[in-house]
Structures are given as structure tokens and as C-alpha cells.
Image: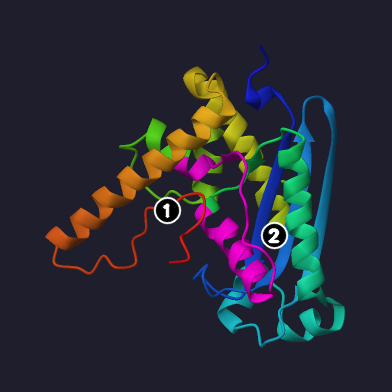
């Protein structure tokens, strides 16, 4: 049986107005399908979030308010298209790969709700951020996408943006699966459920560490692949 890492993968990444996924608005996004010996097929969106884009966010992704207003698509329409692209992959049995899914999928879920659409209904997700922390728990250093690329020998295909990051995340996921065959051999539903458990356990341990250190842990959430709206 072909393992998931050798099949078609849907890639997803976003760039936003801020670091809090419950309040951040979409500025750019990429959804595409890669792998299985077929050509990559990626679609990107530049979106007008309808507000000033903070300078700190522009410094990360390079899109300022003026450009977003002049060139960006209507937010509601773009958000629906992004959702439909992900749903199309899931309906075809293709898993969605996104690095730190609890950020990007939560952003999309909250955007859908803001615009009066149904909440996001996730299918199988592969999150290299979560899997890497499970298979190599005690590695020192950062757990960013850039750091994961270095560890697993992935060379991103250009400067930081949603498309580059989406494609890099897929390559990291494949590299992890190649290095840890038991991850590649897990059926998608089993892997999805396992990631939810691994993330919850890791976040609970981190929250306990913070409390022991006398630090607040209210912002540490164990939900995956998206944060609860409660």
C-alpha cells in the first residue's frame, strides 16, 4: 500500500495581520497540490483585509496596506475560495499539510465565521510542526519552519511567503516520513488523531512548566488542528 508521503498532498499556508489566530485577518494565502509524480498546482490569493496592516506584519510578509487595498481581492470571496480549495482536497482523499496547523486553520475558521459562513470542518491534516516535536522531542533549538528545513535538509524555493512556506512544509513532512517510517505507515485518520493527542500532551506539559516557574499559562492551548471557539 502506498504511504501518504508518496501520494498527493494539499499544501496550505497564510500570511496575516497579526500573531493571534483568533483575531488575525488574512492578507495572503496559498493552497496547492503536490507530489505523486505529478506537476505542482498552486493557487495564491492577495487579500484586502479591510483594515490597516500593522508594520510588524508587513515586515514579516512584505505586504502593506496600500498594496492590499489596490491589488487585494474582496475578503469574503477569497476566504470562501480558500475554504472550497481545502474541501476539494479532503473530498478527494488528499490530506492537507500545514506547518503549525492550529494557527493557519484557526485563522481561516475565524474568518469564515466573521463573514457569516459555517465554521471550518477539517478533514485529515498533516502538521510537520507537531510531528517533529513528537519524533524528536529533546532536540535543542527553535521549532520554526526555517529550523525544521535545516534539520531535515529542505531548501526553500525562495523568499518567505505563503507559497514558499506551504511547499517547504510539504517537503519537511515527506522528509520526516522518510526518516521515521512508522509515521509514513500510519493511516491518515490514525495520524490525524495521534497529532491531536501529541499536541495536547505537549501543550499541557508546557503549561505545567510555566506554572511551576511562576509564569501565566492562560495563552497555552492544546486544541488541534484548530482552536476551539468557546
User: Outermost residue toward the top?
Assistant: 1
Residue 8 sits above or below residue 67 on the image: above
What residue is drawn where x is 85% and y is 83%? Answer: 70
Query: Residue 106: where, in percent of width, then height?
Result: 55, 61
Secondary element under disc 2, as helix, strand or loop, is loop
Please say which color scheme the image uses. Answer: rainbow
Label 2: few (<14), some (14–19) or many (≥20) C-alpha neighbours in 10 Å:
some
Is 95 or 152 nearer to us in this picture?
95
Residue 109 inside the magenta-drawn segment: yes
Instruction: Look at the numbered discs 1 and 2 and tell me whether their residues touch, using CB distance below 8 Å.
Output: no
Q: State the residue at coordinates (27%, 53%).
A: 206
Residue topped by disc 2 = 161
Q: Earlier in the sequence, mark 1 or mark 2?
A: 2
| Residue at screen point 66% across, 88% down | 52
Q: Which mark is residue 57?
A: none
The reply to whether residue 38 is visible in this rendering is yes
Q: Is residue 159 visible?
A: no
**Position of residue 177 measured from the top left corner of the image (x, y, whole percent):** 55, 26
Disc 1 from disc 2: Cα separation: 26 Å
Quadrant where the C terminus is found in the figure:
bottom left
Q: Which mark is residue 223?
A: 1
Closer-to-camera residue (141/174): 174
Crowdedness near tag 1: few (<14), some (14–19) or many (≥20) residues, C-alpha within 10 Å: some
Location of residue 40 in the rendering, given as x and y in whole percent from the top left corner:
83, 39
The magenta-colored residue range is 102-130
**Percent from the top left, x then y, of residue 170?**
65, 39
Residue 86 drawn above or below residue 17:
above
Amino acid at each position: 500500500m502506498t504511504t501518504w508521503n508518496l501520494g498527493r498532498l494539499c499544501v496550505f499556508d497564510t500570511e496575516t495581520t497579526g500573531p493571534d489566530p483568533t483575531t488575525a485577518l488574512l492578507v495572503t494565502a496559498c493552497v496547492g497540490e503536490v507530489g505523486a509524480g505529478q506537476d505542482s498546482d498552486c493557487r495564491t490569493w492577495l487579500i484586502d483585509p479591510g483594515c490597516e496592516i500593522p508594520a510588524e506584519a508587513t515586515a514579516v510578509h512584505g505586504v502593506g496596506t496600500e498594496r492590499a487595498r489596490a491589488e487585494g481581492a474582496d475578503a469574503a470571496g477569497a476566504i470562501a475560495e480558500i475554504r472550497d480549495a481545502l474541501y476539494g482536497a479532503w473530498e478527494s482523499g488528499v490530506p492537507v499539510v500545514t506547518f503549525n496547523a492550529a494557527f493557519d486553520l484557526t485563522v481561516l475558521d475565524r474568518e469564515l465565521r466573521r463573514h457569516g459562513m459555517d465554521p471550518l470542518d477539517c478533514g485529515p491534516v498533516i502538521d510537520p510542526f507537531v510531528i517533529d516535536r513528537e519524533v524528536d522531542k529533546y532536540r535543542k533549538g527553535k521549532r520554526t519552519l526555517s529550523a525544521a528545513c535545516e534539520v531535515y535538509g529542505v531548501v526553500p524555493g525562495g523568499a518567505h511567503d505563503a507559497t514558499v512556506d506551504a511547499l517547504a512544509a510539504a517537503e519537511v513532512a515527506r522528509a520526516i516520513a522518510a526518516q521515521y517510517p512508522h509515521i509514513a505507515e500510519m493511516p491518515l485518520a490514525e495520524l490525524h488523531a495521534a497529532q491531536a493527542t501529541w499536541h495536547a500532551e505537549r501543550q499541557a506539559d508546557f503549561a505545567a512548566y510555566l506554572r511551576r516557574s511562576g509564569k501565566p499559562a492562560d495563552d497555552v492551548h492544546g486544541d488541534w488542528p484548530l482552536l476551539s471557539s468557546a
